[in-house]
Amino acid sequence: MDLASYITIIISTVFVNNFILARFLGLCSFIGISKQTGPSVSMGVAVTFVTTMASLITWLIYNFILLPYDLAYLRTISFILVIASFVQFTEIVIQKKAPSLYKVFGIYLPLITVNCAVFGVAVLNTDVFFLHGKAVPGSFFKALLQGFGAGAGYTLAMFIMSGIRERLDFAEVPESLKDVPITFIIASLMSMAFLGFSGFKI
Amino acid sequence: MVRGNLGEFVKGLWKENPTFRIVLGLCPTLAVSTSVANGIGMGVAATFVLLGSNIFVSLVRTIVPEKVRIPCYIVIIATFVTIADLFMKAYAPLLSRSLGMFVPLIVVNCIVLGRAEAFSSKEPPLKSIFDALGMGIGFTWALIVISAIREVTGNGTIMGICISRQFEPPLFMILAPGALLTIGALIGVINYFTLKVKAKAK
Amino acid sequence: MNQMAKFGLILGIICLIATLVLALTYEVTRPKIIEQLRQEEQAALKKIIPDADSFELKTLDGVEYFEAMKGSDLIGYCLKVTGSGYSGYMRIIVGIDPNGVIRGVSVLEHQETPGLGSKITEVRPDETEPWFLKQFKGKSAKAVAVKKNIDAITGATISSKAVTDAIRDAVDIFLKKVRK
């Protein structure tokens, strides 16, 4: 049980290699949804749930089906189908069990399927936690951690950005920079700030 | 709107440019634009996938029932992404390694699924081909512009050729913040000129 | 026919066709992909121990390594080392002579931060090989350590240490095994 490496994974995924601000995964929804804090955090929670579960399922598929039968080339197609099915399944469950929550998410839930962060972390897990076609020690748990961290980092970035954009409504933004461009520039400053975490040592 | 085939092609280059206008497919755009070579490589790969998926989605558009269309489109797209990935690994390994996990990530590139959903599921194959080419080339030249800016200012090189020894390039342009700043500024500039043209037309 | 079954069938057929196409593509490209990796490996080996005529792949306790032969003399070993870097793993090949002195190091693959950790493979404009890796030449593998006799890359201590420690530990284990 290498506790230090597990902590490193969480810190790395949430801060140092933040999925939005450093890896650029999940940008489309980041730019589109981060206008207000409420929806942003809700989206973040939903994404975190999907990234964690997707990491779990895709790891199992990769380790027990794709690798043993030399089917690694089916990774892309199987992973994205798993993610699409899982999001669909989650949508149905939420619709039945928590209809009010379903109204809040609206059309954003199916959009999680094409969220680069979800597919990205699934692929990243297989790239980083597998070596020469075999799982590294602690691979499963590390993959789960990274999946969770990806979503948590995404939520953090969304939360900060939405807070800033809410205040931006009271500032005088030049017409040509309104909406998308100013969001990118703010994200650039946030990203620079997060670069400061690079020196983190455990 | 009924347009000729040439119109379908040209719209992707400027008016409906996927990167600067529709603002889709941001994740790979920012992540791989660290050098012009990478940008071109990604653009070509994405265009190939766009062509393949647009053609086949258009061919099956009458057979696929509406309720399962998204998973079917995803499978078709994933197939072409994997084909591109395997061929790149075999015939352009250096580029494949440079682009890393962003080649499989083309499957969740909003541009590809977006065109399948918005266009080729409703239009005949020939038109879809022109749409794919226009969008693909539009995406590619946007990538080239962003990569050129980042590579020159952040690395002092263009296509790997060192063009300046006098100045020490600001590293952050090659890193995450630089990407966000570049695209924010570019969209801002484009918006500025678009607004000016609109104002003059009034 | 039941709606759901019809949907499932159509999706299933598309998946089947897709899988067949991909299996075919894989079979077509696989030989080339393996060839590419092999060529890259051979080129790296030749660069590290230039005076060897051939490299023979051997396995010891499940670990692969190469014996560098000049004629029929064993002039060194090349080890495939995997290091855990800052953003992922690194594939390294280190060449040593039979006494454990490093002949050369080559980093085949890494995922370090561009501009910082990626400088482990950076070649300065007037030189021919990465300056960071050149430091390892001629040093005894069990004595290399960052700050002792290896200069780390500014701002990329973790990446530098990862390479150094991986080499030192791997060679140490290997030599112990091979001398038994």
Image (cartoon, coloured by chain):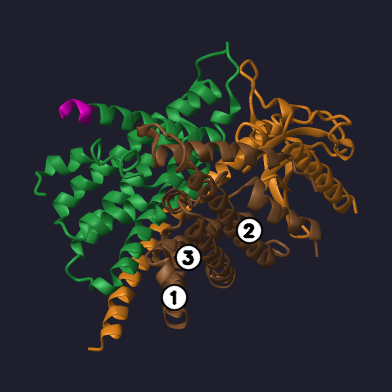
Vertical arrangement, residue B199 with respect to residue B124, above or below: above
Determine which residue is flagged by label 3.
Answer: A79
* Three-letter amino acid code of the residue under disc 2: Gly
Q: Residues within 10 Å of mark 1 (few under 14, many from 20)?
A: few
- Looking at the image, which residue is at 89% across and 50% down? C176
- Assess whether mark 1 and mark 3 are in contact (beta carbons under 8 angstroms): no
Find the distance from the CA under tag 3 to the CA under tag 1: 30 Å
Colour for chain B in the figure: green
Determine which residue is flagged by label 2.
Answer: A149
* Three-letter amino acid code of the residue under disc 3: Phe
Vertical arrangement, residue C126 with respect to residue B125, above or below: above
The picture places residue B104, in percent across and down from the top left corner, at 45, 53
N-term mark: 1 or 2? 1
Determine which residue is flagged by label 1.
Answer: A100
Colour for chain C in the figure: orange
Q: Secondary structure at mark 2?
A: helix
Q: Secondary structure at mark 3?
A: helix
